[in-house]
Image (spheres, helix red, strand yellow):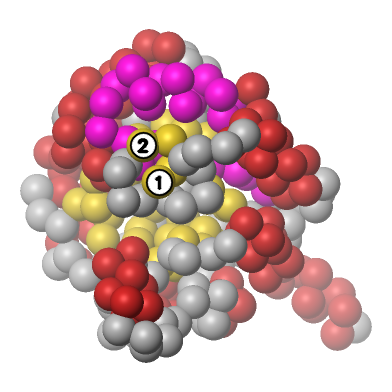
């Protein structure tokens, strides 16, 4: 599949989210994400206003669903989301209900493996439950507090290739990546590149970061899109089989 650049709108007001989204789309971003802070602050209205302003753009609702799966997915779908996020640490039944709602309302499900005991096995479980994408995720608080203590924190790149090889669906790596690392994730076989805090959004103030963010996003988009097709799932398997022959 062709690589996709997604901006995580981890903001707390609709006007700033709309302004940042418009800037990101001018720069070449493919998907918008209604980040968790935006959904907490503005609820479904945040997703609804993004859909009204950008009627043809895919919108990920990062609700991080842990319970009430079918209802939360229904609400986000009716507000205009095209993808919703469910946490792999939720009960299996919750993940399956989000997937069922996805089928019922014509949206896709992204399964997040953050804090699952084994991220690779967790990714397999999410795929088996019907998720269309895997988010391989190291949490912000975990990384930030560790760094404040002078301790090291894992990077999603550490196990990214293992996760990619374990599943047949597209993978996204999230958590503490530099701009260059984010750009390079398609080289690991992960075609969904997410740009959020702290690259485009200030993670402490939940506002658009300072500097020429549009210029930076344009450079990121140009480099990511230049990869061309990234082998995913059966494409990757067929390529490997062909190489063996």
Question: Tag 1 or tag 2, which sits nearer the N-term?
Answer: 1
- Above or below, comparing residue 187 to residue 24 in the picture: below
Whether 72 is drawn above or below 121: the answer is: above
Report if residue 17 lies within the magenta region. yes
Range of the magenta residues? 2-25
Circle 1: element type: strand
Q: In which quarter of the image is residue 28?
A: top right
Q: How far across and down, in percent of the image, does residue 244 sit?
A: 86, 85
Locate residue 222 relative to residue 234 in the image: left or right. right
- Label 2 SS: strand
Look at the image and tell me whether residue 122 can be seen. no
The residue carrying mark 1 is 202
Q: Which residue lies furthest to the left in this view?
A: 68
Crowd band around label 1 with a 10 angstrom C-alpha radius: few (<14), some (14–19), many (20+): some
Residue 155 lies, in percent from the top left, at 49, 77
For the residues labelled 2 and 1, say whether their Cβ atoms are less than 8 Å apart. Answer: yes
Q: In which quarter of the image is the C terminus?
A: bottom right
Q: Residue at x 64, y 39 (%)?
A: 217
Residue sitting at 17 percent across and 38 percent down? Answer: 40
Between marks 2 and 1, how big is the CA–CA gap? 5 Å
- Residue drawn at point x = 82 percent, y = 46 percent: 226
- Residue 224 lies left or right of residue 35; in this view the side is right
Visible residue check, residue 57 = yes
The residue that label 2 is drawn on is 207
**Does the segment drawn in magenta span residue 94?**
no
């Amino acid at each position: 599949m062709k690589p996709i650049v997604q901006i995580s709108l981890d903001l707390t007001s609709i006007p700033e989210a709309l302004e940042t989204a418009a800037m990101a789309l001018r720069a070449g971003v493919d998907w918008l994400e209604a980040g968790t802070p935006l959904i907490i602050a503005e609820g479904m209205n945040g997703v609804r206003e993004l859909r009204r302003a950008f009627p043809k753009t895919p919108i990920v609702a990062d609700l991080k669903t842990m319970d009430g799966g079918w209802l939360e997915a229904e609400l986000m779908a009716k507000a205009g989301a095209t993808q919703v996020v469910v946490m792999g640490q939720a009960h299996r039944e919750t993940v399956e209900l989000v997937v069922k709602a996805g089928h019922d309302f014509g949206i896709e499900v992204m399964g997040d493996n953050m804090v699952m005991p084994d991220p690779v096995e967790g990714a397999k479980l999410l795929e088996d439950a019907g998720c269309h994408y895997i988010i391989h995720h190291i949490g912000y608080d975990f990384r930030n507090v560790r760094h404040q203590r002078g301790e090291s924190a894992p990077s999603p790149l550490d196990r990214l290739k293992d996760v990619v090889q374990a599943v047949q669906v597209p993978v996204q790596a999230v958590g503490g990546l530099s701009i260059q690392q984010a750009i390079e994730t398609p080289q690991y076989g992960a075609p969904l590149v997410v740009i959020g805090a702290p690259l485009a959004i200030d993670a402490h103030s939940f506002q658009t970061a300072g500097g020429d963010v549009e210029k930076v996003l344009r450079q990121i988009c140009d480099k990511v899109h230049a990869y061309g097709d990234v082998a995913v799932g059966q494409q990757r398997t067929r390529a490997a089989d062909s190489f063996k022959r």
